Amino acid sequence: MKIFHLFTILFMTTALSFGQNQSFSLITDPITPASTIITGEVFRFDQGLVTQLNNGPDFNFSNARWFSIGELNTGSQDVFGLRFQLPRRGVIFGYQDINDDNPRIQWIDDREEPGSLEFRFANDTLSTSSTLVANMTNNAKLVLPAQVFGPPFIIQPVSTRLTVANDTFDNGIFVTTSGSNNQGNGIFARSTNNANNVAVRGLVTRASGFGSFAYGIFGDAPTSFNSFAGFFDGNVNVTGTITQGSDRKLKDDLKESENVLENLSKLKAYTYKFKDNDNLNLPKGLQHGLIAQEVEKVYPELVQDITYPIYNEKEELVDTDTYKSVNYIGLISELTAAMKELNAKVKELESQVEPRVVYSSKFTASELENITKNAYKLEQNRPNPFSESTIISYALPEDQNKASILVFDLNSRMLKSYDLKNNNGELKINATDLNGSGMYLYTLYANGEEIITKRMILK
């Protein structure tokens, strides 16, 4: 009886050994069915490798469940680590090969809608409940959930989703983007409105530097076509100042702008409202500005064609569109030069103004003597030149009850007529009564005759 029991134990041990230890074949080889005495899971052992078949005819990718730990030969390379394989999807932890310095987490998924790599937190080993911390998608997007669901099913608002602590001059977050089709976002931040009217911040950075510089956000991009260190689709507000590099040492081929008054006179200022656009966050309400196409005819170097991306609801690039943009800051120097030209013209006109009284040439010497004797007076306007209003003093003979002051442009077109009701007094002329900056003539007119004419300048 003892011999029978010993034989039975020896038989089972031998069957178990043959059923489990298949040591010298690749994982892609068909597995030899285990002895009928072995049920459930099947193992394969090799030097530095343990592989377990959980379900399926062999260790394949399409319809089997298995895992391996150790040095795993995949047919083209040796992977050192741990692999979990489910039908048509799997995950590997470890090193790509013996010479690899960087360990990796790699998941494989050839389904039509591949899954994402989830990072989760749990505080209970006896439960499958966990908190989703982050998602890594198969197209290299890191998705941080807007809210965290904590037990017991309470929505916990999250104030900070990504924190980088750095006390050195190294970069907290450094992103290099090279996008296909001229599109690629290093950091894409979007803020949306909420029902509670609470401040929503898509991206928040703070810099506190003790040296010569500190940057909250540092954007670096070549100044080639359609490359921007920062692209903002919507309003931008700052409480500090915005400056541009304008040092002489940065510039070459310096030339003073010429004929700027003539060039600027070709531009028209408009008030307008932006059209509704589903792909751009354009300003609302009444706007003031220029038309890019009109600026381009005069200053083509200040107009640029902008290509912007169009995304769908999944933040996937689906199309692009273009619009023209104007460098308004570049126009500031032209306005400065225009003021310089205008001041020069005003000074030239001032030098031409004759403060002496000019009487009409129609009068004879005796008539002029009578005019001066009867106290016709027309003083030089003050101030001259003027920008808002000016005053003209005048005097008429006592028996003169009908006279006026007429204003003409240099083309002898009468612009304004002011009736004089008193024999002496002052007349106020507003700049709005005239046709803009320039020289004008004003005349004392009485008894159907031009008595005295003088010049005035509106700046």
Image: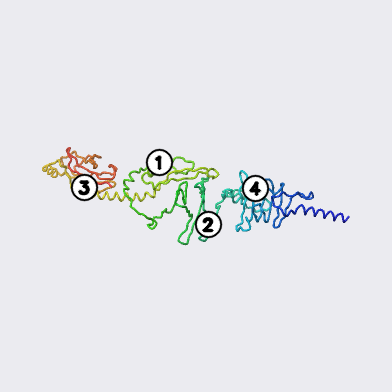
Q: Position of residue 284 (x, y in %)?
A: 44, 43
Point 54% across, 56% down: residue: 164
Q: Secondary structure at mark 1?
A: strand
For label 1, the crowd category at 10 Å Cα-Cα, with few meaning under 14, some 14 to 19 and many 20 or more, is few
Nearer the N terminus, badge 2 or badge 4? 4
Q: Marks 4/3: CA distance? A: 95 Å
For label 3, the crowd category at 10 Å Cα-Cα, with few meaning under 14, some 14 to 19 and many 20 or more, is many
**Residue type at the position of mark 4:** Arg
Point 40% across, 46% down: residue: 303
Q: Which residue is mark 2?
A: 172
- Tell me if I can see residue 198 in this picture: no
Q: Which residue is mark 3?
A: 380
Residue 72 as seen in the image, left or right of residue 259: right
Nearer the N terminus, badge 3 or badge 1? 1
- Between circles 3 and 1, the one closer to the viewer is 1
**Residue type at the position of mark 3:** Gln
Q: Position of residue 264 (x, y in %)?
A: 34, 46
Residue sitting at the far right: 1
Q: Secondary structure at mark 4?
A: strand
Quarter of the image holding residue 398?
A: top left
Q: Which residue is mark 4?
A: 89
Nearer the N terminus, badge 4 or badge 1? 4
Nearer the N terminus, badge 4 or badge 3? 4
Q: Marks 3/1: CA distance? A: 43 Å
Quarter of the image holding residue 407?
A: top left
